Amino acid sequence: MEHSHHEGEVIIQATDLTVSRGGTIVLDNINLTIRQGDFVALVGPNGSGKTTLVMAILGLLHPTKGTVEILGQDSEKMKFDGKIGWVSQAAANLPKNVRITVRELIALGVLSTKSLIPFRGNKQETQRKVNDALRIVGLQDVADVDIYRLSGGQRQRAVIGRALASNPEILVFDEPLVGVDRESRNSLLKLLDELCHKENKTLLMVSHDLPAIRQSAHRVIYLDLVHDKDCCSGGIQYDGPTDQFPDLVGLAALRGIQNVHESPSFAITSHGTSSSVVLSGTSKEEE
Amino acid sequence: MVFEDISIFLLEIIGPFLETIAPYMPGETTPVVLGMEFFHRALIAAILATVVGGFFGSFLIMRNLALMGDGLAHVSFGGIAVGMVLGGVAPLWYALIFSTIAAILIHEMQTRELLTGDASIAIFLTGMLALGLVVLSVWDVGITSTVEGYMFGSLLIIDNESLGLIVVISLFALSTLYMFHGSLLAATIDGVSAKVQGLPVRFIGLWFSITTAAVVVSMVQIVGTLLVTALLVTPAATGQLVGRSFKGCMIWTQVFGLVSVLLGLYFSNELETGSGSMIALISAIIFAVVLISKSVYKQYIMKPVANR
């Protein structure tokens, strides 16, 4: 299943990746190639293993079987050196009782294992990296403002800035559009586009937000549980260009649902100010 | 012993200075007390514990572990009680061992998600306080004035060995915090980001727990096991009300902490109250005043801006 627009260098390669949790196979024999310059959206219902796949790719959990190579290294023995940036969901992941300015937050992204050795940090170098990140995410004007005084969209930009500060090759996003209003949403999507095309980053985005994905990503990987007699195991149900990613009816067929209209939990809902498709568990055995 | 030497060395440097300024101090008792060696020890210990406690307290609040200081202090009391019965070395050493073990256990239980933060802390808190009280009554020590000193803080029980231990703990805590504060902040704000960045999140968490335990022990003689929160969390919480950046919060925390301690010691001398309770009371009053002024400010002065 190779549908990449780019013929760039392979930077993420998962081979026969299997991950189980508590007896359930969450990911079953995943084979996946991501090349330099790709903008990949990872979609699927809750519990389909999106986060598990990302964590396995980053080497943060041990696969039952198979390997992941990322930037030429085995992900489990990965020496993280700022080549990967993780963008968490700002709305949910920032603790409420930390007062911190945008500049201070972004400066944390410059830290590496080397910064644990005292007097090794180069202040000017740090400042330059922070200013570059501030410029890319467009937050120069609010650099010294407490992040809790910012809008959801600005806060998400600050978190992206933090991930950008180490000048990574790969950026991994976890639901970046949750808690972001409609106006900020479009400008955030524009930022993602710029990160891919102007800054030459490879983007991997976990998201539920199908309209946003159709608007921005090059490639969609759709994960879902495969049901068989022993219960279920997770796998890739679609991997290809965004413009060929099936619509709702097609998706339903992919998931083995015959009649979309008879399945009440498979619906378009209004989520905050932006409408998005909620792919909650629907198939017979699930839930 | 090394710890006593450290204490004597410090007193030799700072003592003459304090004796010189003593006559110029306000009040009746303070000028007299400031000329005495026991108060020099108390003052050095209190200032060190406040500075270190302010930094660690700020991180405890950020990590939603404000109760941790209280829990570890109660564990220390258990250790002190055992130490008073067994003897050998200063009870503070027993407190250090007990609270360090408790900190590691609590940290491991939390990272393995065996217990949520508050529950595991509360169990250690009551369990070890109870152990201390039972040990004291079974061995017929009872609640003596020394025991009360450990519970509510007493400047008189700070001897040279204790001051030396407090100095060493404070220097260790400050120097390691200087190295790790960035990583600690990164891990506090977003653990996954910090891991992906290559920061040793697990190690940082363990170091923070152990060092916090030691810092709490260093505060026990000044404010007492029951009032440790006053020095650890209250100035940090007040600082968070005023500061608008991480750096700002740290500076304000130190300002509020030092003001609380100095005013607390002054009034406890003048009114002849316990030092710990006076420091705790002053820091709580400062917190209340700042909180009220802030809400008044927000309500009446900031309103046009807030409505933008």
Image (spheres, coloured by chain):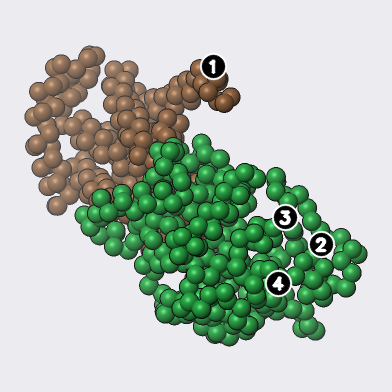
Q: Label 1: few (<14), some or many (≥20) within 10 Å?
A: few
Viewer can see residue A202: yes
Residue type highlighted by circle 4: Gln
Judged from the image, the secondary structure of the residue bearing numbered disc 2 is strand
Residue B74 visible in image: no
Instruction: Look at mark 2 in the image and give the residue it sits on.
Output: A266
Q: CA distance from mark 4 to mark 3?
A: 19 Å
Residue shown at 29% from the left, 58% from the top: A115
Percent across and percent down for residue B146 are: 32, 38
Q: Which mark is residue B300?
A: 1
Give the chain of mark 2.
A
Task: Note the chain letter of the brown one.
Answer: B
Chain appearing in green on the rendered image? A
Q: Are marks 3 and 1 on the same chain?
A: no
The amino acid at mark 3 is Ser
Name the residue that disc number 3 marks. Answer: A276
Of all chains, the one bearing label 3 is: A
Picture coordinates of residue A211 (x, y %)? 69, 58
Whole-angstrom CA distance, mark 3 to mark 1, is: 41 Å
Q: Chain of mark 4?
A: A
The lab-note entry on whether marks 4 and 3 share a chain reads yes
Residue named by callout 4: A244
